[in-house]
Image (cartoon, rainbow, N blue to C red):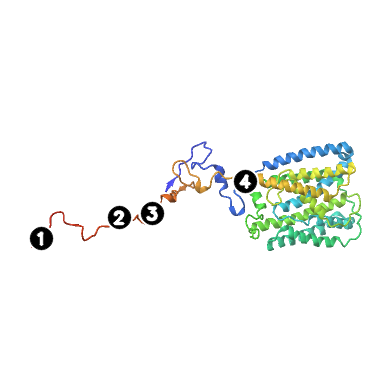
Amino acid sequence: MAYDEPGRAGSAEPASGVPAAVLENVFDDPAHGEPGRDRVAVHLVWEMVLLVGLVAVVLLLGREDADALRGDGLRSLLVDVVALGLLTLAAGLSLRTAAVNLAVGPVAVAAALHFAEQGDRGVTTALTPALVAAAVGGLALALAVVVLHVPGWAASLAAAAGVIVYIERRTAPVAVQADYDPHRTAFYLFAGFAAVAALGGLFGAIRAVRRVVGRFRPVSDPARRRGVLAALVTAVALVGSTVLAMLAGVLLAANGAGPVVPASGLDWTVLAVGVAMLGGTSAYGRRGGIFGTLLAVVVVVVFLAWAAAHGWTVGRWTVGGAALGAGLVVTRLVEACGRPRAATGEVAEVAPAGDGMISSGWSLPRPSPADNWPPALPAQSTGTPPDPWEVPRWETGPRHWDADDR
């Protein structure tokens, strides 16, 4: 056994000669994905494209309707951004865990109907039962996903059907009876949403956090369970997404100009999932951008305001379908260009300078190639072996007892 020589001061590599990046990556658990750090450059490039698009649609809106960018028009626009932003965060949070929650749209509509009916009793009184119902419903959905280990989209689609049954009990639009006006705190609401979206993206860019959040994402057979930690994180994400969808529905009702119309809410689901994917969140889970969700939400809301000011009738199904289609392309881009860089060598293949040993403090010799191993049996001679009775072995001189004739 041989010891590695101590490293020299100021050396960028360990004394064993193994690059630091390799030593950092080889300790990742291969059962939880590829070793290495996800590349975020593709997200930053795409977010620059979204920023350019945001500047373009803001200029178009300012040219078409300047009042929409100041005063009450700006406050209403910011509340719309926060409402769609919370719904997009709900969809994006579940997408990150590879268990997308398709019930966010129906939950938002159900919460809007509830707030419209009970809002006159006070915001706290109206929100408390809605919050409890959202948390309990999200927990039931989470248990179905992690205990049965079934796809999130299938379980949440069943949950969405149950919420739609609740919505269909209303046959007529419901007027909002609450006196809560979100316009008075529009700037604070937008600042809070922007902080949550940006800090969540920055926090999710950390490799350890990203791997924990996306651990439910299958890496081999999707039917194999991913462990207790993956189940716990996915359950928390599903509960959180349901609660965020409920809060988005309250803002939609409070900021609406008319009564809340009973609808399935699936158009809101398509829009939220599409905007989340448009912002850089992968449809496969785990990978996502930093400021992409914030930029994508603002782009879509400003575009809808510009289309309305321009006299176009653009529905949520149209915008959601377009965002979802573009998001699929973004997912392919993120998955192809955001994968970890290939390691420069495996542990068993990296040799330190001078001895061909692995670097772990102790060193072991490498096995020799198979073609240099000694044969299992000695080579056989092809010649005829001599007769042992005819070859003299001990006598070096003449046989004395045969010297005379007898």
Q: Which of marks 4 and 2 is nearer the N terminus?
A: 4
Pick the front one: 99 or 135: 99
Q: Is mark 3 on a helix, strand or loop?
A: loop
Indicate which label's residue lies in the foreground, 4 or 1: 1
Indicate which label's residue lies in the foreground, 1 or 2: 2
Q: Earlier in the sequence, mark 3 or mark 4?
A: 4
Q: How crowded is mark 2: few (under 14 residues within 10 Å), some or many (20 or more)?
A: few
The residue at which mark 1 appears reads as 401
**Position of residue 381 in the picture relative to residue 360 (left or right):** left
Q: What element carries label 1?
A: helix
Rendered view: 403 above or below 48: below
- Give the x, y percent position of residue 284: 69, 52
Circles 1, 2 touching at the beta carbon (< 8 Å):
no
**Position of residue 211 in the picture relative to residue 359 (left or right):** right
Circles 4, 2 touching at the beta carbon (< 8 Å):
no
Q: Is residue 121 visible?
A: no
Q: Which of marks 3 and 1 is nearer the N terminus?
A: 3
The residue at which mark 2 appears reads as 383
Pick the front one: 113 or 106: 106
Q: Residue 340 bears which disc, if any?
A: 4
The residue at which mark 3 appears reads as 375
